[in-house]
Image: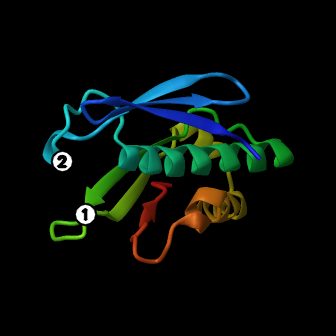
């Protein structure tokens, strides 16, 4: 169990503190939803969680097999619904793999890494109501 302590600071802004590390972050409502857009919105954090979870799990798998996947990037595009209720409609994950990493990984390794990314805990926690296409750019 991990505790996150959050406080509403007014003007559609919240502070959050990660219990174990005491690391803090700020959320702000987006401009298109009455906010200032000066920090991550709550739904931005969902997109951030997806991308960082995918990369972290790929790193764990790579470590297990002795693969160096340093430098793989993922860009997550968050698309909101255009009609009520307001929610995340789509999270598009586009991976960029450096040529040096591509050269070190055979087809089986690439398949294992893709499976790992697509079955990370955050991805498995996202309901089917959110479309999550991924492209690995191998």
Q: Secondary structure at mark 2?
A: helix
Q: Residue at x 66, y 62 (%)?
A: 107
Comparing 112 with 98, the one in front is 112
Of residues 119 and 33, the one nearer the viewer is 33
Q: Tell me the distance, in whole angstroms, between the alpha carbons under discs 2 and 1.
A: 9 Å
In which image quadrant can residue 10 be found?
top left
Residue at image mark 1: 86
Q: Earlier in the sequence, mark 2 or mark 1?
A: 2
Residue at position x 31%, y 63% from top?
87
In the image, taking residue 66 as reference, residue 126 lies left or right, namely left
Residue drawn at (41%, 67%) of the image: 133
Evaluate if marks 2 and 1 touch, with contact meaning CB atoms under 8 Å apart.
yes
98 up-or-down from 24: above or below:
below
Q: Residues within 10 Å of mark 1 (few under 14, many from 20)?
A: few
Q: Residues within 10 Å of mark 2 (few under 14, many from 20)?
A: few
Residue beneath label 2, please? 33
Q: Tell me where residue 57 appears, x and y as whole percent.
A: 69, 49
What is the x, y in percent for residue 84? Answer: 19, 70
Q: Quadrant of residue 15?
A: top left
Q: Position of residue 83 (x, y in %)?
A: 16, 70
Is label 1 in a helix, a strand or a loop? loop
């Amino acid at each position: 169990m991990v505790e996150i302590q959050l406080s509403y600071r007014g003007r559609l802004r919240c502070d959050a503190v990660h219990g174990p590390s005491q690391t803090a972050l700020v959320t702000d409502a987006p401009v298109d939803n009455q906010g200032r857009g000066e920090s991550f919105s709550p739904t931005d954090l969902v997109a951030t969680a997806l991308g960082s979870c995918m990369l972290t799990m790929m790193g764990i798998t790579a470590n297990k097999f002795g693969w160096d996947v340093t430098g793989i990037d993922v860009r997550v595009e968050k698309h909101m619904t255009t009609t009520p209720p307001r929610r995340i409609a789509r999270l598009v994950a586009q991976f960029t793999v450096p040529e040096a990493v591509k050269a070190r990984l055979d087809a089986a390794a690439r398949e294992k890494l893709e499976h790992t990314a697509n079955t990370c805990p955050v991805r498995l926690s996202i309901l089917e109501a959110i479309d999550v296409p991924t492209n690995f750019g191998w």
